[in-house]
Amino acid sequence: MRKCAFIGVGIAAVLGLAVPASAQDTVKVGSETKRAAGTVVSLTAGDIACYIKLKDDRGTIFEEMADFPICEQRALVGKRVALTYALNKVQSPDCQGDPDCKKTRTVALVTAARVAAASAPPAAPAAKPRTTWCSADELVVFNCATNTRIVSACASKGATATSGSLQYRFGKPDGAEPEIVQPRDKVVPSKAALGSNFPLSGGGGAWLRFTAGDLVTTLYSAIGKFGPNGAVQERGGLVATKLGKEVASFKCVGAPRGELGPDWFQRVGITDGGQDFEMPE
């Protein structure tokens, strides 16, 4: 195919209509809307222009007319490029490649194609902070957030003294896995923990205790006259001891939630095992 020179100077240069590619998906060239970037698939020299076939960031193939010298830039094939356009006069297709033909038409022509950075993949939606370590198919026996951790006791739905399981889980809200799980294996509730109720002025409470070697962890939930001037409030938290000495204490921010209490203890066969609990101040 023969190359025919552009007829006349680019009117974009005269009218200030040259449009550089930008970070936008499209640019306006005269009355036309053009893609601002794409990955070059092929370059083909035609009778009136260089034809660039490209693929946009969504995978759609499109074609643009370009200045002839761009067809000589074979290194652009396979590269993502930013496109610069201008309105220019080119020979009319009616001329059928005749170099002496004076018919013209004005088109949006690619005047530059520079290698651009690859399009960044869509950002993944931000993960919501965890509110519990219990899964959707488990019963939340105890759950609360402390200033830095999520504390959960999770049981199988429909668990009894001889079936199902119970675990204590503790970890950061943004953690992939809990930092502590007791017991590690699935154990029926009556063998996984001890627990009971305790009376309080204006209310009462319940505790649930997990033991792993020398480490004893007790979760508690209570309602009583803890507030100013004896106002009734809910409290909850965790106390951990080792060889009888306190090694950690976490208080719930807000009231804990769950099924911890006498009805659930009876249903799953949990007893106090001859132990008691003194709630921290």
Image (cartoon, rainbow, N blue to C red):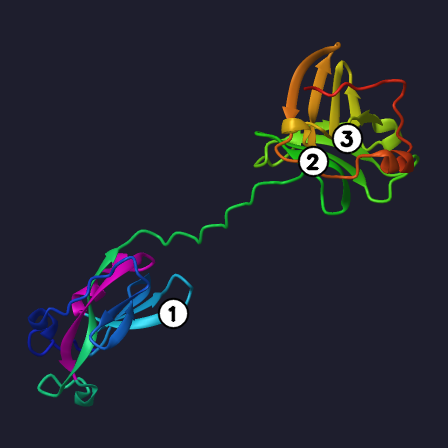
Number of other residues with Cα within 10 Å of mark 1, as a class: few under 14, some 14 to 19, many 20 or more: some
Residue found at x 69% / y 13% = 246
Horizontal side, residue 45 vs residue 200: left or right:
left
Q: What residue type is labelled 2?
A: Pro
Number of other residues with Cα within 10 Å of mark 2, as a class: few under 14, some 14 to 19, many 20 or more: many
Question: Which residue is farthest front?
Answer: 229
Inter-mark Cα distance, 1 to 3:
73 Å
Q: Quadrant of the N terminus?
A: bottom left
| Disc 1 and disc 3 in contact, CB within 8 angstroms | no
Between residues 122 and 225, which one lies in front from this camera angle?
225
Q: Which amino acid does label 1 sit on?
A: Ile
Residue found at x 14% / y 75% = 88
Q: Which of marks 1 and 2 is nearer the N terminus?
A: 1
Residue 161, how many percent across, how many down? 92, 34
Q: Which amino acid does label 3 sit on?
A: Gly
Can you tell which of label 3 and label 2 is closer to the viewer? Answer: 3
User: What residue did someone put label 2 on?
Assistant: 256
Number of other residues with Cα within 10 Å of mark 3, as a class: few under 14, some 14 to 19, many 20 or more: few
Residue found at x 54% / y 45% = 127
Can you tell which of label 1 and label 2 is closer to the viewer? Answer: 2
Q: Quadrant of the C terminus?
A: top right
Between residues 199 and 272, which one lies in front from this camera angle?
199
Does the magenta-highlighted stretch encompass residue 58? Answer: no
User: What residue did someone put label 1 on?
Assistant: 61
Q: Give the range drawn in magenta.
A: 67-91
User: Which SS class for mark 1?
Assistant: strand
Between residues 64 and 131, which one lies in front from this camera angle?
131
